[in-house]
Amino acid sequence: MSFPLQTPVDCPICHKAISRKADLPRHMRTHDENKEALMHGCPFPNCDYKTLQKSNAQTHIRTHTRERSKTCPHPGCAFATTDPASLTRHRK
């Protein structure tokens, strides 16, 4: 089974090419007048990290807790990380 390639769409405000049409609403939040109200902040004291994506905030929080819940499924591999993207890069 093959999936058709998605055609990138351009942001109507900054003209950045967004690789998937489904990602455009998320990108549009970067232009929102109330962007600060949409931010997800880090709850740890003295940490000013904020992001528009909740999943990025969750990944960031694991840098404080040192939780390495993302593990390589390959038998015998002990790789573990806080960041899902790091696991994806590791598996390639």
Image (cartoon, rainbow, N blue to C red):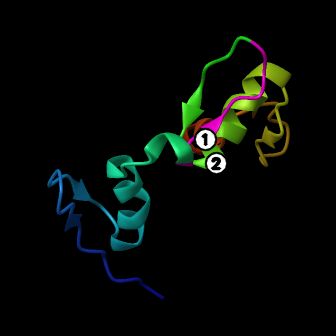
Residue 87: give x, y in percent of width and height. 65, 40
Contact (CB < 8 A) between labels 2 and 1?
yes
- Residue 29: x percent and y percent? 41, 54
Q: Is residue 80 left or right of residue 11?
A: right
At horizontal 72% and vertical 40% (from top left) the residue drawn is 58
In the drawing, does residue 63 fall left or right of residue 12? right
Mark 1 nearby-residue class (10 Å; few <14, some 14–19, many ≥20): some
Q: Residue at x 79, y 41 (%)?
A: 71
The correct choice, above or below, for 85 with respect to 47 in the image is: below
Q: Quick check: is 43 in the magenta stretch?
A: yes
Q: Nearer the viewer, residue 6 or 12?
A: 12
Mark sitting on residue 56 = 1
Is 12 part of what is drawn in magenta? no
Q: Quadrant of residue 9?
A: bottom left
In front of the other: 60 or 45? 45
Kind of residue at disc 1:
Asn
- Left or right placement of residue 40 versus residue 37 in this view: right
Residue 49 locus on image (x, y percent): 60, 24
Classed neighbour count for the residue bearing mark 2: other residues with Cα under 10 Å, few (<14), some (14–19), many (≥20): some
SS at mark 1 in the image: helix
Magenta stretch? 38-45
Q: Nearer the viewer, residue 27 or 19?
A: 27
**Residue at image x 57%, y 31%?**
50
- Name the amino acid, label 2: Lys
Identify the residue at image location x=33%, y=83%: 4
The residue sitting at the bottom extreme is: 1
Q: Which mark is residue 54?
A: 2
Q: Main secondary structure of the magenta part?
A: loop
CA separation in Å, label 2 and label 1: 5 Å
